[in-house]
Structures are given as C-alpha cells and as structure tokens.
Amino acid sequence: MAGSGDSTLHALKPLLDWDLATLHNDSIWSVVELPWEYENGEITFGNIEAINEAANSGGEMQQLLRLVILQNNQTGEIYGFKMAIAPDSEYIQGTDLSGNNNYLSRDSNLRGLVLFYSLQDEFVNGWLYSDADTGEGALRAGNASPIEIEICASWVITVLDIEVHGQNCKTVYYLPTLDIGSDGSGGGGYNGMFGDTDGGGGSSSNNNTNPEQDTDTGEANPKEIFRNSKMTEENWKEIEKMLDKIIKNCLGKGLYNGLKNSLNGKTLPIEFIPGDDSAFNYATGKISLSMNMENDQLFHEMWHAYQAYQETQDSYKNSLLNQEIETRYAHYLYLDAIGSKKWNEWGELDKSYKSISTLKDYITPKGDLRPGQSTLSLESHILNNTVPLLKQIPAYNTPFDFGNPGLGIFKNLRKLSKNC
C-alpha cells in the first residue's frame, strides 16, 4: 500500500481482550474472533470515498475490526488475519452491526465491504456487497465484471498528547461482487478469506494417470505426443532437438513424461506459424509454434497442454489466469535451471515477469510453501501483484478463479517435479 504516514502505522499498539473472544464453527472451519483495538489510536478500513465523506462531515465510520483465527477441520491448518466489515451508510442506520456479522455468517441485508488483511496489514482479499435488483442473491466470485475500487486504511495515533494521522491506499482490481436482491434474498451467505467455504476450492480433475512414473527411454520422440501429416522432416527434427534439450532438465523430463502419460497413446496437433508468438488452444488441443521459437517456449506450451488434460474444458476456461501463472512460474524455473538469464532480462522491461520470479520467495521449485511463509502471504502477492500486472496485458485479461488463489495454482508443478 502506498500513501502518507506509512511508518506511523507501526506505532499503533494492539489491545486484544481474549475474554471477548467468540467461537463459531461449521463443517470446514473452527473460528475464534475477537475485537482488534489499539491502546493509543484507531484505524479505519474502507472505501476512500466513504472515509473522506465521514472526515468532511466530522462523523465517524462505523465498522467492525476483528482478529480472526481459523483452523481447517480437515487439514488442521491454522490461519490468522484481520477482518474489517465496513458497511455503507444506509445499512448502518438501525442495524446492530456486531450482532449480525461474523466470519461464518453475514446479515442478508449487508451492504458494503468485507475486507481481509494479513497481521502485517497487507491487503489480501475482499468482497463488495451491493444492492442489486436481481432477486437472485447470486455469488459471482471470479466471474464478476471487473471493477476498480480504492481501499484505504486511515489511522490516528496519540503520541505525547499529539494526534498523528496517516493513510495508506491501494487500488484493488477485480474485487468480486455479491449481489443481494432487493427483497434481502441471499440468506446471509458469505464469502471468506479463501473465496468460499471450502478453504480454497480447486478445479476438478480428469487425470487418472501417474505423471511421476518414469516411462522415459532417454530419448524424446516428438511423434509420440504430436501429429501433423503435412510437417516436413526438417521441422520434425527441429522439434526433436528442442525436446532433447527439455528432457535434459528434470522438470522438463517430468513434463514430457507427464504429457505423454496423460495423452495415453493419443497425440496433439502441432504446427509452425509466422511471427514471434506461440500458443496453445485449449478448445482444439493444438500447439502453434513461432518459427523463431526456442525450446523454453515449447516447454511453456507443453505445460499448458498438460494442464488442460487435468481439467474439464469449463474449469480450464474459467481459470485461464491461474493456469498462466503456474505455467509462467514453471517457465521461469526451467530457464533458471538451465542457466538462462532471459527471464531476468524480460523482468527489467515488464514488471509482470518480475512478479512471477518473486514467487520463488514464497514457494519452492517443487511448488511447496517455503519455511517462514504463509498461504496468506502467497495469496496476497498473487492477488495484489501478479494478477493486476498480468491483467494489464490485453492477452491475459482472462478469468481468474478467486476460489483458488494460492498454493492450489501450483498443483501440476508439485506432480511434475516429484522426482526432482
């Protein structure tokens, strides 16, 4: 977040009264919540327009700020974060804000913002509840029309009887919207830190093969996985040379074998095209290669092909940006392993490449969380850095599955790197 007075935020001293803690649970989560207050000041989260309106009118914004501790009943994983509920002025009138809203339950009439921050006050995720005359109460997470909203943290700290003010603001893109009908339909439904109540969702899989099983003979045969009856022998040899380079790398070898096993005797159409761009078409299964391409670009498109065989066509189509993020990270790892500096050079020109290479600070080359990192910090980086930067590129302004924003993105990397 960027703004004035950033350093003063850290001078706020938390005041947590565990006697006020409440316990909630459902089939997935056990939740402890308590008010997050400060000894020497206060902090307000919300829409910049609402914060400024309250400041100009001399009033105070009503909101809930809570420490939330979750334990997943299935995995035992524990998460801690801040939850801010910042309703609009119409909802506040005549409403017991604290009595009707918690992590697992929202008032069916809620209008406003529900925001999630890490314990270090980094914005992680958020949901906008709006009054729409749809009568459906339908959640459109991830498929909602992209919107742009400026979220701010505004605070005042008393130091030696002097009030010090500060504010951090962040422009958030693609904040999913929950439309609640004019009749209040929606039934108190909610969306949480992870996008839904199942702790991260994930896409369905059609994969019944074992990509970790090494069926490689030591040589790559392009006609085992590709087909094109019109391709010249010279072009086949070029593909073979590139595949030979790919399988010399451990991750590349896992990809080649994984794709071959997923195809189960079938082959993918492949072609060379003019220009500098290569692509994988998930609808036809065809890989189109630039005449100027190098082996890492073939690696990239083969990764997309492997991904597609682990998904239904709908689940792949509705998570195109998730798939791209995993493929780009695998591409970066491949180049780094063979000693190429290309990704770093691209990163000097395009911040989206730098955002991908920075993932190494959060997850290992095998797709596991690094010691000392949390799923929340990984998701915060992806949602507030990687996704917005990629969506600025027209070709990648594609659907992102907000129910699967973190480690779940790298499930194929974990499979294909198992023997590395």
Image (cartoon, rainbow, N blue to C red):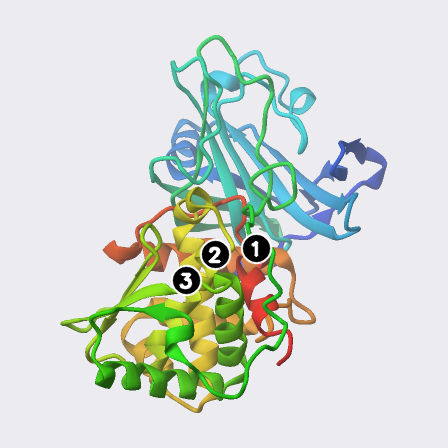
Give the quarter of the image for residue 132. Answer: top left
**Which residue occupies 52% across, 50% down?**
123
Check disc 2 and report the residue beneath it: 309
Give the quarter of the image for residue 267. Answer: bottom left
Vertical placement of residue 199 versus 377, above or below: above
Check disc 1 and report the residue beneath it: 207
Under mark 3, the amino acid is: Ala
Q: Are the two marked residues, 2 and 1, in contact with CB atoms closer than 8 angstroms?
A: yes
Residue 344 as seen in the image, left or right of residue 257? left
Residue ranking furthest to the left? 274
Q: Position of residue 9 (x, y in %)?
A: 56, 55
Q: How many tags in the picture?
A: 3
Check disc 3 and report the residue beneath it: 305
Question: Label 1 crowding class (10 Å Cα cut-off): few <14, some 14-19, many 20+?
Answer: some
Cα–Cα gap, marks 3 and 1: 13 Å
Q: Position of residue 323 (x, y in %)?
A: 44, 57
